[in-house]
Image (spheres, helix red, strand yellow):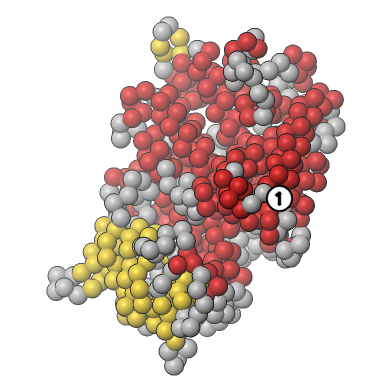
């Protein structure tokens, strides 16, 4: 963290700047979760990438949003061509991401000058920075990496066809690189993937012919999509689904599919989402028949993480726009960020962002630890990532909508017009609660993880370790969080004795409680570390988060006598370091 407050008043807007150097939250989490041997290389790369996204990428993304992709299903002679026309800026953004900064390469192959491949956490920080400019771009980017994850999990990287697909997905040569996609959704089932009906008929040459419709196909013209389909005599439900690579072209000829139309979406306009009818399209089986849903889950675990980091990028950019305006705009005789209520708002929003970043990148760290160690389903890392990933996806998506909406409000009427960045941030982030499973679907997955994989067995000691603080100044706060942790344990015990409908009814409350307790514990642990470095800022962050989410106050803070967010504005909203001596008077309840 920087010792002096960030001077947002020196900026005119949240562009033409380095998003990495302007985001102390991301930088802090990177230093916390990245492995020591990878950290400095990653930090240097992320700084350069944050500069590239802030200078050029963001402006190009705005133009792409004004000139989104167009579908040409037929040519002048009525022949099916399935061509998507893009603004030229799209290709430059792809070149910068995939070639210059090796977005999908470094998690699978050693980067230049290194002997080992990077962890997925490094790529996820890049995804967060991309989302400062365009959440839509992160969709094909995450599916490209996710497709490679699925192929690697299926042990198909040496297959003549699938291995070549994997090689090109992970290439750092833009002329050779291809994008991936996953097509799950069908009209009749939506999130109920077990009702999927697309058929895959085996051919004598070992390929399959796919027939049927896919209803929501993002990155519709990807050079190859991973598609769930049902083989003959397969059982009903997800157990009967197999996974297929369906290329856009086979032997230089268009595969037998029809791109019906593109969806007229609210946001994420840079990624074309549409409907596909397969008419005997050639597909290549990935893994074994009947293993499709399991392999798709490998892809989805990663993409739920990118959904969370996408939410972080939106929150970071929205806060940047709001803080710049509040530092520049005067109203009623002083700057907006000199008014107590605005200072409170910006402080609280910053704390929400820091909690989201701590939780999301802890989930990423556990995911990476599982991937690197090749640990089985009984490992703590597996249980923790399987629990933390859906919770992170669920909560950050919803919080990003709230943060983007309020930051638009900070800009007033100017923030509502399309000339500003904030309307697109709000339009784009509305999809995050839907992508990779809507909130109800995600909260039910949390129940499944606790029931089937006993994730609580890893969660309980993990939280206890986080709350084992060394500094006496944090003891009372840690005890408060420990009390909420006991409430969580009570809730889990209650759900274990009730029927499935009761558990389902309370699933979202449970997901929120897990998030609040774990996020608070992470912030307390971070505060303990930073106190050892002579900085009490994180202690203030943890205090305000606990006050907002874990304390009960019937007067909503009005009778507390506190103005916590206002009094500590420079520390909370502008990231100024804080002398630990301030904690002697900082433990009073903050205003809700």
Closest to the observer, 111 or 386:
386
Residue drawn at 40 percent across, 38 percent down: 426
Of residue 392 and residue 318, the one placed in the foreground of this image is 392
Q: Position of residue 386 (x, y in %)?
A: 65, 55
| Residue furthest left as drawn | 77
Secondary structure under badge 1?
helix
Determine whether, in the image, residue 456 is placed left or right of residue 76: right
Quarter occupied by residue 119: bottom right
- Quadrant (top left, top right, bottom left, bottom right) of the C terminus: top right
Residue plotted at (14% across, 70% down): 76
Residue at horizontal 46 percent and vertical 13 percent from the top: 335
Q: Is residue 77 visible?
A: yes
Q: Quadrant of residue 297?
A: bottom right
- Nearer to me, 165 or 413: 413
Q: Is residue 245 visible?
A: no
Report which residue position mark 1 lands on: 496
């Amino acid at each position: 963290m920087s010792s002096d407050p960030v001077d947002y008043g020196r900026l005119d807007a949240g562009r033409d700047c380095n998003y990495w150097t302007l985001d102390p939250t991301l930088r802090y989490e990177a230093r916390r979760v990245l492995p020591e041997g990878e950290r400095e290389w990653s930090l240097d790369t992320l700084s350069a990438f944050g500069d590239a996204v802030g200078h050029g990428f963001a402006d190009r993304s705005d133009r792409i949003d004004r000139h989104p992709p167009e579908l040409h299903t037929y040519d002048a002679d009525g022949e099916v061509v399935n061509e998507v026309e893009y603004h030229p800026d799209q290709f430059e953004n792809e070149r910068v991401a995939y070639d210059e900064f090796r977005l999908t390469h470094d998690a699978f192959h050693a980067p230049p000058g290194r002997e080992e491949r990077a962890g997925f956490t490094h790529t996820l920080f890049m995804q967060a920075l991309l989302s400062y400019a365009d959440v839509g771009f992160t969709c094909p980017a995450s599916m490209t990496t996710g497709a490679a994850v699925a192929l690697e999990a299926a042990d198909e990287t040496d297959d003549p066809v699938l291995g070549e697909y994997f090689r090109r997905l992970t290439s750092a040569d833009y002329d050779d690189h291809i994008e991936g996609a996953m097509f799950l959704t069908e009209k009749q089932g939506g999130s109920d993937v077990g009702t999927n009906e697309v058929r895959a008929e085996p051919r004598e040459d070992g390929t399959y012919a796919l027939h049927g419709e896919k209803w929501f196909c993002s990155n519709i013209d990807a050079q190859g999509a991973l598609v769930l389909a049902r083989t003959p005599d397969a059982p009903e439900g997800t157990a009967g689904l197999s996974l297929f690579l369906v290329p856009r072209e086979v032997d230089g000829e268009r595969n037998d599919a029809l791109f019906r139309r593109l969806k007229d979406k609210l946001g994420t306009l840079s990624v074309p989402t549409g409907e596909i009818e397969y008419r005997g399209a050639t597909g290549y089986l990935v893994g074994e028949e009947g293993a499709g849903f399991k392999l798709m889950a490998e892809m989805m675990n990663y993409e739920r993480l990118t959904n969370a980091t996408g939410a972080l990028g939106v929150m970071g950019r929205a806060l940047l726009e709001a803080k710049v305006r509040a530092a520049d705009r005067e109203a009623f005789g002083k700057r907006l960020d000199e008014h107590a209520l605005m200072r409170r708002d910006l402080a609280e929003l910053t704390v929400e962002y820091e909690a989201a970043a701590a939780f999301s990148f802890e989930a990423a760290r556990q995911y990476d630890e599982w991937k690197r160690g090749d640990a089985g389903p009984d490992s703590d890392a597996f249980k923790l990532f399987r629990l933390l990933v859906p919770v992170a996806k669920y909560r950050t998506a919803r919080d990003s909508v709230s943060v983007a909406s309020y930051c638009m409000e900070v800009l007033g009427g100017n923030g509502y017009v399309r000339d500003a960045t904030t309307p697109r941030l709000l339009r784009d982030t509305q999809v995050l609660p839907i992508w990779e499973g809507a909130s109800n679907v995600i909260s039910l997955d949390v129940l499944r993880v606790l029931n089937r994989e006993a994730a609580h067995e890893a969660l309980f000691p993990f939280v206890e370790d986080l709350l084992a603080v060394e500094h006496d100044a944090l003891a009372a706060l840690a005890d408060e969080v420990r009390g909420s942790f006991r409430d969580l344990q009570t809730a889990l015990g209650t759900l274990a004795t009730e029927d499935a409908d009761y558990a389902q009814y309370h699933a979202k409350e449970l997901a929120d409680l897990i998030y609040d307790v774990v996020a608070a514990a992470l912030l307390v642990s971070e505060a303990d570390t930073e106190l050892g470095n002579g900085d009490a800022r994180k202690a203030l962050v943890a205090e305000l988060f606990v006050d907002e989410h874990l304390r009960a106050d019937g007067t909503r803070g009005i009778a507390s006598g506190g103005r916590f967010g206002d009094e500590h504005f420079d520390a909370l909203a502008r990231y100024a370091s804080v002398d630990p001596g301030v904690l002697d008077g900082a433990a009073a309840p903050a205003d809700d």
